[in-house]
Amino acid sequence: MKIAVVCANGKAGKLIVKEAVERGLDVTAIVRGKNESAAPDSIEKDLFDLTKEDLKNFDVVIDAFGAWTEETLSLHSTSLKKLCDLVSNTDTRLLVVGGAGSLYVNPEHTLCVSDGADFPDIFKPLAEAMAKALAELRERHDVKWTYISPAGDFQAEGKRTGKYILGGEELILNSKDESVISYADYAIAMVDEATTGNHIQERISVVSE
């Protein structure tokens, strides 16, 4: 299996690469500058400069793109559209590092985490941008995509426990009634999905045990 990780120099990207490499998978890092990840091979190119030729030999492309500032939030949609267009009508699967704000908190799927009164205002623009990108992704019936939302508390420096609970469209809690997961455990879930392909054209979610 050949896997490409886009934005592999980011915090999530590096840990996803590390997890995949340690499992003996064939991993290529796609980065704008010098490859700083554990991937033995790299494509040093901006995401928006990638071509169909660059991605044609991969079984799975993992999108670890992130944008946080107000002026770059729209890139969540444009970058995802770019990658979708590159793998459109192919067997290459596209896995996306998603957000938690769009997870539903009721069975009717009318209310999201970001709608809650206690959801920080500072994160609402990011949640809205990522929710918009997800909504657009759902319309891509020409792409074998999977969107993986982390828990509400997504800890970059959290420990790797090796365990997680898999959920669906709704926010789930662990045995301690917490919605938390480390980047390292999220990486395990991402690589698990990359190797199994169990949730094509679905949004799934993960939380620590």
Image: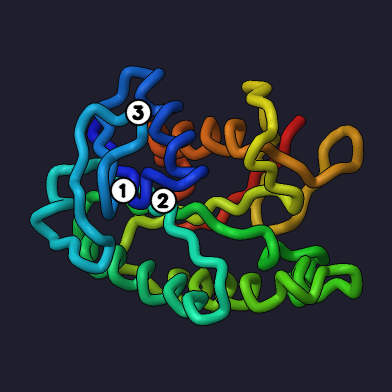
Are the residues flagged by discs 3 and 2 in contact, CB closer than 8 Å? no
Does 200 sit left or right of 181 as displayed? Answer: left
Residue kind at label 1, given as amino acid type: Val
Most distant residue in the front direction: 34
Q: Which mark is residue 38?
A: 3
Most distant residue in the left direction: 53
**Quadrant where the image shows the C terminus:** top right
Q: CA distance from mark 3 to mark 1?
A: 16 Å
Indicate which disc, 3 or 1, sits on the residue closer to the N terminus: 3
> For mark 2, what is the residue?
95
**Quadrant where the image shows the N terminus:** top left
Are the residues flagged by discs 2 and 1 in contact, CB closer than 8 Å? yes
Secondary structure at badge 3 equals: loop
> For mark 1, what is the residue?
61
- Residue 14 versus residue 90: which sits nearer the camera? 14
Q: Position of residue 48 (x, y in %)?
A: 25, 68
Residue kind at label 2, given as amino acid type: Leu
Tell me if mark 1 has few (under 14), some (14-19) or many (20+) residues whose alpha carbon lies within 10 angstroms of its own.
many
Q: Is residue 152 positioned above or below 108 on the image?
A: above
Residue ID at (67%, 67%): 102
Residue ID at (70%, 39%): 181
Q: How many badges with numbers are in the image?
A: 3
Secondary structure at badge 2 equals: strand
Residue kind at label 3, given as amino acid type: Ala
Does 98 sit left or right of 168 as displayed? Answer: left
